Amino acid sequence: MSLIEPENLSLPDDWKIAAIGDVYDFTKKPRGLKLSEYPFIPFIPMEYVPLGKVCIHDFDSKPSAEISSGTYVEKGDFLLAKITPSFENGKQGIVAIDHDFAYATTEVIPIKAKPNLSDKMYLFYLLLNSEIRHELAGKMEGSTGRQRLGKNVLSAKKIPLPPTDEQTKIVAVLSAIQQAVELQENLINNTQELKKALMQKLFTEGLCGEPQKETEIGLVPESWSVNSIGNFCDVKSGGTPSRNENTYWENGKIPWVKTGEIDYCIITETEEHITESGLKNSSAMLFPKGTLLMAMYGQGITRGKVAFLGIEAATNQACAAIFPKTEIEIEILFLYYYFEWQYQRIRNLSHGANQKNLSATIIKSFEIAYPQVAEQNEIAAIFKSIDRKIQFHTNKKQLLTELFNTMLHKLMTAEIRVNELDLTELEQTLAN
């Protein structure tokens, strides 16, 4: 059952199919409002319209004389981003500021419910449905990269509409799940901040509370050594078999890693595979499970990230494979977390006229500070424990998001009625 064509749904007798514009209003600036009477006006730019959350709490305070354009919105309005890619990504929120009205970016549509006909949160959640988003995105107009959803298109969109009391009950169920999702997101963010703070502390102060010494890379514990990667690690790179030779790629069984797959993770599968022939007839190399990889090239934030191989795999030439030597004892997991901490410093070493890249030479010259192996292992274990906690909350958030999407679809197509739900069981699910 699809929400795109509500006419084809088997809806209860007390439900109806209505155009959004018939049951919701688009907020308009009231006649006679004089901005000059207000010294400052709250202004909501697109960056404050949330993604994956409900409320808009933040705003900029602008002198009224500077408000030359914008969208008039009122407290409690549902703001829907209308420009690409913000609309497709799901940016939307409820104005929850301590002011009766505000101005927002021109790239939003402010919506409010019509009394006794609709609940604004019902539409808020309905428009999070991926099918409806995709349908409306296909009707956006404008030049490439600046396409917008027309208010007339949104207004004409037909939706299934239960009685207002059932809308409110559906909203209550979805809001409970959404709050649980947001709780997990907050726990993830808080744990990531804790990890960041601990990295700064442990990699500069260590675990033993010893005095620090000044080095070429900053303050480090007195007993720690400072050395460049090349003195205790080998750094190798892979290669790409010719794309013109099908026998190098077709039915390939050897996992082949690209930089986009290196993202502070354990790589257990890859998008592409190469054949034995492709491996032998290129500069690609087969690296063992447990190899530490670093992205040397990559647009955006990719360059400088690291990951572990959870499988035996080859890589392209943009990936560096890092192997500790035996002469100096360095734990690979300690090195992984040190690289994560030094992500920005590593990126700053990149060079290139058009696109800045790292190289094996740059990585080998990169200096790090490290303690004895026992302390390396203790530090790595702390961060591994934190990562497990982050992964736990990430997994729970994903399960709750899947539950939200399933319940949204089933409740809004009347496949499940609210009065059929075991709310006690749902509450227990959200609490666990």
Image (tube, helix red, strand yellow):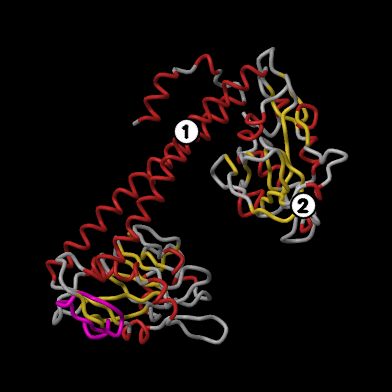
Q: Which mark is residue 70?
A: 2
Q: Position of residue 370 (x, y in %)?
A: 21, 75
Q: Which mark is residue 73?
A: none
Callout 1 secondary element: helix
Q: Would you identify the image quadrant in which residue 120 lies?
A: top right
- From the viewer's side, name the closer residue of 368 and 405: 368
Mark nearer the viewer, 1 or 2: 2
- From the viewer's side, name the closer residue of 196 and 43: 43
* Quarter of the image that includes the C terminus: top left
Residue located at (34% from left, 49% from top):
391
In the shown orientation, is residue 360 left or right of residue 328? Answer: right
Callout 2 secondary element: loop
Residue located at (67% from left, 23% from top):
9
- Magenta stretch contains residue 274: no
Q: Position of residue 401 (x, y in %)?
A: 48, 39
Residue ID for mark 1: 403
In the rendered image of this protein, does residue 163 appear above or below residue 145? above
Residue located at (13% from left, 73% from top):
372
- Residues in magenta? 215-232
Q: Position of residue 305 (x, y in %)?
A: 40, 68
Please name the amino acid that badge 1 sits on: Leu
| Badge 1: residue crowd in 10 Å (few <14, some 14–19, many ≥20) | some
In the rendered image of this protein, does residue 146 appear above or below residue 305? above
Q: Would you identify the image quadrant in which residue 32 lies?
A: top right
